[in-house]
Structure formats: structure tokens, C-alpha cells
Amino acid sequence: MILQSARMAWKSIVANKMRSFLTMLGIIIGVFTLVVLVSITSSASDSVTESISSLGSNLFSVSISDDKGKPVRLDDLKDLAGEESLALVAPVSQSSMVINQSGDDEETATVYGTTGDLFTIQNKSLAAGRFLKSVDLSNHSMVAVVSSTTAEEFFGNVNVVGQNITLNGMDYQIIGVLKEETNTMSAMMEETYDVYIPFTTLIRTGTGLSSNITRFYVSSASEESMDQAETALKTWLLSRFENDEDAYKLINQSSVLEVMEDVNGTMTMLLGGIAGISLLVGGIGIMNIMLVSVTERTREIGIRKAIGASRGTIMLQFLIEAFIISLLGCAVGIVLSGAAMLIINQVGNVSYHLSVNIVIIAVAFSMFVGLVFGLYPANKAARKKPIDALRYIG
């Protein structure tokens, strides 16, 4: 009975192609909106989360706004690193410099003055060469570690260890090249020209920079000791800055990840809700057209009932018809979503992907919409009396 009802429903859909397509349009738009918006949001959020995670979940960053006349120096950070719950501490000073190579066109680079521990703290990997060493800081060496983007832009490849690059007219020998990041967010950030030089060298060669450390990164001994590390770090900062919590800003990387996950979940639910409303509107469109179809086919219903069709059979036919229309609209919406994602990836040079979970949700919700909004028209058709239906002129 179900197979026969499905065949009759399909014949009715095919017989009115344009009307069936217009009926599906609401579902198509709803599914397209749901899948594309949520997939893009999910992919972008995952990329941001991955980028943050790649820096390490046992990472703290400290920014000092008021040193209370007790500026933090490199030796102070060495003492801080001696805490049992802490592993590594690295200062970071930043400046913009003009960068070029062998008289080539000049660009602006972001130059970081730091120590070799920063690369370990932030889980950075090398494509070639080595990181900064303590001897580089002691000797104020004119050496640099560059990003892969910087190496490829100025030399055409990453095998540039031993070659020189110019920063503000001064030559620096390249000792290392960072490996290219793979996640989307980090890849976008790598479009800038990043150069890392010894902290002591930047202080000497940079403009308007001080040896006072206002920003540094800290890693805990392990992820399990994050709480102890945070407590030790807060104790050190408070004792140094007269118990003034406003003198510094301490950011726990794991807390940032938790906040990002909460924001991602909220955004996904919000966009999913908006797209869900579109699907409900599409469901109302199905119900309206199905009611019109029931009215047009009143005599057909009367004839079928007169030759023995039960109320359940009539109801099943119209319910399956609404169900098929909804599923076809869902299928078209998913295909268009896939095509849209391919175009977005090509045009935007990104790597967004369709979320399988969202596709499953879209299919399930479309089935639900088809059944719920097809129920009233199907019931109305099934309740018609054969005599009244046969007398219907239209």
C-alpha cells in the first residue's frame, strides 16, 4: 500500500512540475541557508579554535600596564621561570620595520624581540635552521628567524638559512625559517611578514623601545598543573606590583579556549535557529499548496473512496506526497550548498567544508516539516465524504 501511494504521489508531483518546484523552493532556501551558514560558522570557529589550541593549552600571557616603578627585566623572568609549576618564560617586544633583500621592493614587517623559549611555548616548528639561543641574546646578535611567508616572498623558497635580510637598513643573518601553518586562521595571519630577533637586539636597534618588559608568555610544567601555575604567577605579579590587580592582565589560554567553544556553540545555535525559521516557512508553503491540491483533486478522492479506498489510504497518499516534496527540496538545497561551499573556497582561498552533522539535521528537520505540515491537508482529504466529493464541481 505504501509503495502504491508513493507512486501516485510521485505522478502527482511530476504532473505539476512548476508548482511542485515552487512548493519546494521554501525548503530549498531553508536547507541552503541552514547548511551554508552553519557550516561556514562551524568551519571558521573550528579554525580559530585550532589556531588558539596550536599555541598550547598550558599557556599564559601577561601584559603589564603599570610596573609601579619596578620594571620587569630579563633577569626577573629567569627567576620567575624557577617556580616549580612553571616551565618556560619568554618576553616579547614588538616593532614595525622596513624589510627588504638585496635592494628589492620594500615592505613592512612585524619584528618580534624575544627568546628561543617563545617558539617552544607557542608550539612553533621549523622548516629549516634553528631557533634563537641564549648566546644570541648575550651577544646582541644580528640574527633572525623568519616566517615561511617572509622567506618565500623575498627569496622564493624556505631554504634561506645563512642569507641576509635587511631591517631598517641593517643586515640580519637568517638562522631559521618557521614551518607554514596549516589551519585557515593561522594561514591568514601568515600573510604578514613576521621576523623574530633576539630581545636584546631589538631593544638596541628598534626605535622608542625600552628594556622594560611589558609583555611575556609563560607555560606551565604540565596541563595538570595549570591551576598551581596560575596561582604562582598571580602571587609573583601581586607581590611585585603592590597587590594591584589592575597593574597587569593575565590571560589563561585554556580559559580562552573554553570561552571560544561557548561562543561557537551560541553562534551555531543562533544561525541554526534563523535557518530553522526558513524551513518552517517552507513547511507552511507545502501545507498551502497541498490544501490547494486537495481541493483540485476532490473528485479523484471521491472516486477512490467509492471504489473502496480507505480513509488511511487517502491520508497516506497525500502525506507521502508532502514528505517527498520536502525531501526533494532538501536534496536540492544540500546540492546547492555543496556547490556554494566549493565556490566560496575557490574565491576566498579558504578550506570550509560541509558539516555532516548539519546535513543530517537538515534532512531530519525536512522530513519532520514534510510530515507535520502535510498532516492537516492529508487529514482533510481523508475526511471527505464520497458523495460530497463526487458532487464537487470546483
Image (tube, grey):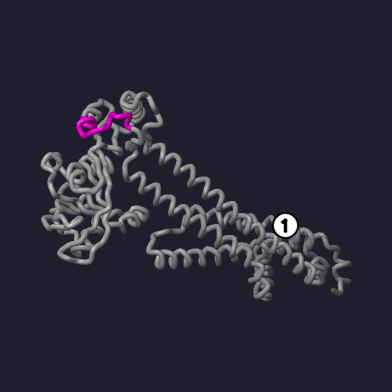
Q: Which residue is found at the position 86% from the left and 71% from the top?
A: 390
Q: Can you give x and y, in whole percent of width and height, for residue 315 in the image?
A: 74, 60
> What is the crowding at mark 1: few (fewer than 14 residues within 10 Å), some, or many (at least 20)?
many
Q: Which residue is found at the position 34% from the left and 39% from the top?
A: 57
Quarter of the figure with residue 69 = top left
Q: Is residue 378 above or below residue 140?
A: below
Nearer to me, 217 or 322 = 217
User: Which image quarter holds the N terminus?
Assistant: bottom right
Q: Which residue is found at the position 51% from the left and 57% from the top?
A: 37
Left or right: 74 in relation to 13: left
Nearer to me, 303 or 85 = 85
- The residue that disc 1 covers is 375
Q: Is residue 149 visible?
A: yes
Q: Is residue 20 found inside the magenta-colored segment of the image?
A: no
For the record, the magenta segment spans 67-78
The three-letter code of the residue at mark 1 reads: Leu
Left or right: 393 in relation to 22: right
Q: Can you give x and y, in whole percent of width and height, for residue 347 in the image?
A: 41, 67
Q: Can you give x and y, in whole percent of width and height, for residue 184 in the image?
A: 36, 55
